[in-house]
Amino acid sequence: MPRINGNEIRPGAILDHDGGLWAAVKVDHVKPGKGGAFAQVELKNLRDGRKLNERFRSADKVETVELEKKDQQFLYETDGMLTFMDSTTFEQIELAADLLGERRPFLQDGMTVRIEYVGEEALNVALPPKVTCTIASTDPVQRGQTAANSFKPAILDNGLRILVPPFIGEGERVVVNTESMEYSERA
């Protein structure tokens, strides 16, 4: 595994630190008036989701880990297990549905996702950044409210609640950001 200096850590980097695999979520480079510069790094454990804040000085050496990324197609869900198929080898794997967490409702039949592996262990399922959904219910359009920068609650076809602009009505298709879980645009 390659080793890098503490000041070379970037967001998204996967580190082998304290006997676990950690993803760098946020990195702030701090140069105090007294003492040496350091990187304040917010880490998230890839196996159990714990968070940790660490300081790395430029002299500190950290091991980075390269994840193998495979595009796989979602087939079905049974008893809390999601079944995916590799589109090139047609091998099927089952992963726990809680690996997706609160983003689980965005997973649609036939959707291609990117699964990240360390060896044979699947650590993360990355959904596409934007997904098209249908508005199941929302308040009717109010005349005169379209000029203001206001939002109204809506329920998507997958059961999630989001805020949408006042001109969006029931049955319309919208694009939703899967990371922030917010309305992005009309489909």
Image: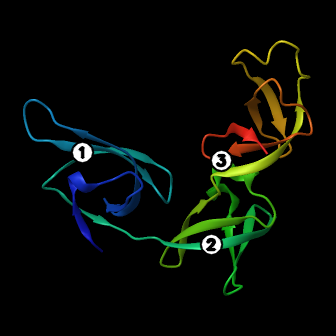
- Ranked by sequence position, the earlier of labels 1 and 2 is 1
Q: Looking at numbered disc 3 in the image, what kind of residue is underneath it? A: Thr
Residue 69 relative to residue 154: left or right? left
| Above or below, 84 relative to 97 | below
- Residue 93 image position (x, y, % from top left): 68, 76
Contact check, label 3 and label 1, Cβ < 8 Å: no
Residue 13 relative to residue 71: left or right? left
Q: What element carries label 1?
A: strand
- Residue 105 image position (x, y, % from top left): 75, 50
The CA span between labels 1 and 2 is 33 Å
- Residue 185 image position (x, y, % from top left): 72, 39
Please report the residue visible at 16 percent of the width from the left and 36 percent of the height from the top: 31
Residue 137 relative to residue 149: left or right? right
| Above or below, 34 relative to 132 | above
Q: Which residue is the site of mark 1? A: 39
Q: Which residue is the site of mark 3? A: 178
Residue 126 sits in which quadrant?
bottom right
Q: Looking at numbered disc 2 in the image, what kind of residue is underneath it? A: Asp
- Residue 107 image position (x, y, % from top left): 74, 57
- Ranked by sequence position, the earlier of labels 3 and 1 is 1
- Ranked by sequence position, the earlier of labels 2 and 3 is 2
Q: What element carries label 2?
A: strand
